[in-house]
Image: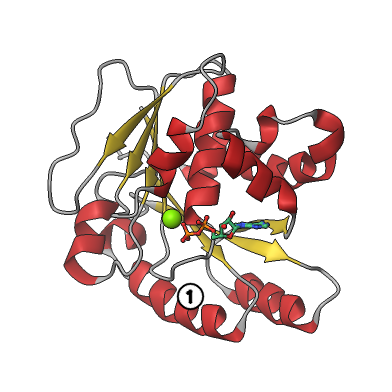
Amino acid sequence: MRRIMVVNPKGGCGKTTLATNLAGAYASQGARVVLADYDPQASSLAWLSARPSDRARIAGVPAVPGKELKLPRGCEVLVIDAPAGITGKPLKQLARTAQTVLVPVLPSPIDIRAAARFLQELLTLGRVTKDRLRVGVVANRVRTRTLIYQTLYHFLRSLDVPFVTSLRDTQNYIRAADRGLSITEMAPFMVAYDRVQWEPLFNWLDSAASLPRPKKG
Ligand SMILES: Nc1ncnc2c1ncn2[C@@H]1O[C@H](COP(=O)(O)OP(=O)(O)O)[C@@H](O)[C@H]1O
Ligand SMILES: [Mg+2]
């Protein structure tokens, strides 16, 4: 089973946006997707309840940190929307459920500082240092011509983990969220540019580089 978690203790950086877009994309490709929502605000599950019934089905699971995740049978792709504020032991526990962690970061001084602190913690987890868990960062709500994007870009480039893609700041994500859809399920002419930006992310997630290193022997 493919297990992808979206995490960043900072609220509003795009965790739910990434999680729901991943879930929608994999489901529309025919995979049996489970979306596990650890956020007490349950935004991912709210997205799911807005999802039209004629769209590829996604199973939503409300989840609680520290409690075992009960997955429906036949799950092929598990997407985890992690709660805001998570660090320390709960982060360590949650990290055990994933193969790949995506960290969205906004172009703002506060978000960059918070992400630096969080990544320092994440990258020293045993599972990460042993390549049992792979980490990738994503710049979100980007406006490329701004100075702060340049700062974010250099920060993400300077890290020891893949800087997988930059997603622009666009109403398309708001519209998709409203309709229970992912970007890949919207009218292609509307989201052509956004699809291009998602491509490196899907390619990375499809590659061995985002999967745990196989155990020797
Ligand atoms: N790339 C983007 N462009 C425009 N709006 C975005 C983008 N990413 C997220 N948003 C909006 O920003 C808000 C916070 O994003 P969300 O995914 O809910 O963050 P989190 O789950 O980390 O709290 C939401 O209203 C969402 O629709
Ligand atoms: Mg959220």
Q: Please give left or right for residue 217 compared with residue 112 in the image.
A: left
Residue 184 coordinates in the image, percent (x, y): 68, 32
The answer to which image quadrant residue 91 occupies is bottom left
Name the residue nearer the viewer: 154 or 28.
Answer: 28
Is residue 202 visible in the rendered image? The answer is yes
Q: Where residue 89 appears, x then y in whole percent?
A: 17, 66
Helix, strand or loop status at disc 1: helix
Q: Residue at x 39, y 22 (%)?
A: 76
Along the horizontal axis of the image, is 93 left or right of 87? left
In this orientation, does residue 207 appear?
A: no
The residue labelled by disc 1 is 115
Please state the quadrant of the image where ligand 2 appears: bottom left
**At label 1, which amino acid type do we have?**
Ala
Q: Position of residue 114 (x, y in %)?
A: 46, 80
Q: Is residue 210 left or right of residue 131?
A: right
In the picture, measured across the screen, residue 14 lies left or right of residue 214, that is: right
Q: Position of residue 37 (x, y in %)?
A: 33, 44
Q: Nearer the viewer, residue 47 or 105?
A: 47
- What residue appears at the point 33 percent right and 39 percent down from the top-left corner? 36
Q: Is residue 212 above or below residue 15?
A: above
Query: Image quarter for residue 122?
Result: bottom left
For the C terminus, the image quarter is: top left
